[in-house]
Amino acid sequence: MRNYSVKLNMYSKLIYCVLFIFLSDTALAQRHVALNKYVKDSLTEIFANYNDVKRMQIVVRNDLAEAVYVDGPIDNDVLKGSKNNTYFSLKYLGDLFFLKKQYPLIEKLTQNKELMNSIDRQDRNFILSVEAQSISIKPLFDGSVFCGFRHSSQLKFQKKLNANYKETIVPSGDSILILQAIVNRDGSLGKKMLLHGDEDDKLYSYICDNYQDYNQENKANLNTKGLFLPYLSGGTPFISIIEIFVRLNPDRTFSVSGSGRERKLRIKDYKEDPNDPLMLF
Amino acid sequence: MRRELKLAFDELEKELLVIPPDDLFRFMGGFSTGSSSSGSSGLSANASIDEVVDYLKDTGMSFTQDSSGNYYFNPTDSSGTSIRLDEVVVTGFYSTGSSGSWDTGGTGASGFNSNLDMYIAYLGGYGHQFSGGNGSYTYIPSGSSGGTPTSPSTGGSQPGDPFKRENGQLVITPTDKTTDRDYIYVDDPFDDVILNFEEVNIKDKNGNDVLAYRVVSYQTDADGPKYTDIPDKYKRNCHGSALGVDLWFIDIYDSNVRDVNIQEDQGFRTMMGGYTSNSSDSNVISFYSGSLLTHSVKRDPATGEIWSKTDHGETKHYTSLDAFFADGKNETLYAQSMRKYYKL
């Protein structure tokens, strides 16, 4: 059996050449990765400003950029997971916060509609792989079922935060907390650490107290009402990691967001059980 | 001049990377797109399983369909055992990087010119023989060619089927327990559904109970209605898919069902332990992380091809185990995991 792939022998190349001559101004020419000037200039600026960035891989699903991998910079604080490849979800507010802080030019490009409009592609789902001198399109993989918020419970928890808020709870910092936590197999949270914010902050206490209240109120049904869903493989739950973003907005409501996808262990006092390992994706 | 010509070829190769598979093979005179006097199948490369089965029926092969719409090839020869054909999503081919080179495997490309070729290869893995090629085949029953199915016989059970059956059906006894899996995540590529399961016991061929979970309904909202028109891909997880049954084998870890220290997939693991094999003969491979079963794939021992399913997602086909590892994060998740090989 042959693969779909094509080996280009000379005969084939001649045929391609003829095709190229006759069709280059029509169908074929419309199908390559042709970026417009704005995008080209943005990429040039990105690689000129971030010398340690070797490659960006922009994940596109349903014609929308949903994440970006930044390859190159070494992150020595990582205890488990890749040290030289960082994933930023464009749907998770915590990753957007860090992306904007660390790589504002990349964040600006991924948010610009010009990026998607400039790519003439065959599929709505793909990875745009960009290096300083080359651009290519790669297939998108489905991956695993990483841990995350249970959607219905997240909405209820957010309502609870909004309802219980009192004006006396004033953040000492910038009103944003970003937390990394272990998600146990039953969906409960284990060890945690703040990636942004202060543990002495009243806002942090407020979030933790409301989480405990939520669990208490739903203790009889945590299997269906719990706030977090563990990583699943074939339906079996595994220990994993989630990162949680909470922001007190100017109108005194809360934004809550989380992601368990492509997280890396940073919690220094977490000891992994080899029989019950930490699953990361 | 040579350099310019090389650049032109390189550029052309890049341009051609984004031509749809069908268009490319039509340009190159590959598979046929219609009936022809050359005897080609008349099927497109991405023909549906229904079209493929229709074509194979015309070659003299016998198929039946169960109530869920699954097709079974029923040989009329001495093997006398049916083989289920699962619908497979072919991910096609893609560039592997900036070089513009074609992928020769490793990104989930099907490895075949057409879906028909793939199903022929799959049936060939069970020892069935065909003459022809390139999208045009004639089935050769074993009685006429001397061919013998290569799949092992497992007593009264079908090859590759470790379960006891009565009138072709699994022996299923509900335990009266229920559970669910909530897949309504915020940042997740899979269908946003809650799958509702009933727990059942099925019998292995030795009469031992094996706990499993059968999807009885699904929801698209936690407070919404339950739907019983269950899409085929929801009916089995990776382990069920590898064994060809519409069931999930899960360590539920739900204290509302039973003590979480009891692993509900233990029956599956014990049963599979009776089919331990070496890597080359195996037709199922399971992966473990620590003491926990994480994944299973179906393997064709004749060709080394792999079929893998993730939770309630689609089944994906790979030309080899290495190609499976090369897709996405499979290398990280499974390549270094403990593997167990089984021959059913």
Image: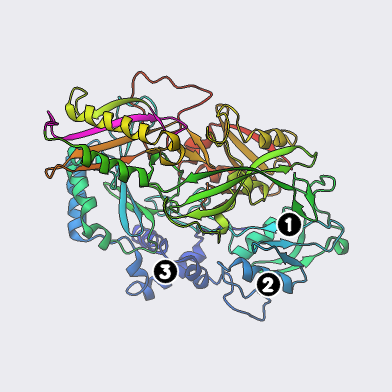
Residues shaded magenta: A168-189
The C terminus of chain B lies in quadrant: top right
Q: CA distance from mark 1 to mark 3?
A: 46 Å
Q: Is residue A227 left or right of residue B105?
A: left
Number of numbered discs on residues:
3
Pointers 3 and 2 in contact (C-beta within 8 Å): no
Residue B24 sits inside the magenta stretch: no
Evaluate whether residue A98 shows in this view.
no
> Quick one: label 2, few (<14), some, or many (20+) residues within 10 Å?
some
Element marked by disc 1: strand
Task: Tell me the residue at 12%/28% (across/down).
Answer: A172
The Cα–Cα distance between marks 2 and 1, rounded to whole angstroms, is: 17 Å
Mark 2 — residue?
A: B55
Q: Position of residue B26 (x, y in %)?
A: 52, 72
> On what subunit does the disc labeled 2 rest?
B
Q: Which mark is residue A17?
A: 3
Residue type at mark 3 is Cys
**Quarter of the rendering containing residue B262:** top right
Percent across and percent down for residue A99 are 23, 40
Query: Is residue A30 or residue B297 the one in the foreground?
Result: B297
Which chain's residue wears label 3? A
Q: According to the image, label 1 marks what residue?
A: B83
A276 over A133 or under it: above or below: above
Of the residues under marks 2 and 1, which one precedes in the sequence? 2
Mark nearer the viewer, 2 or 1 = 1
Name the secondary structure under disc 2: helix
For the residues bearing labels 2 and 1, Cβ distance under 8 angstroms: no
**Where residue A66 sits: x, y (%)?**
31, 50
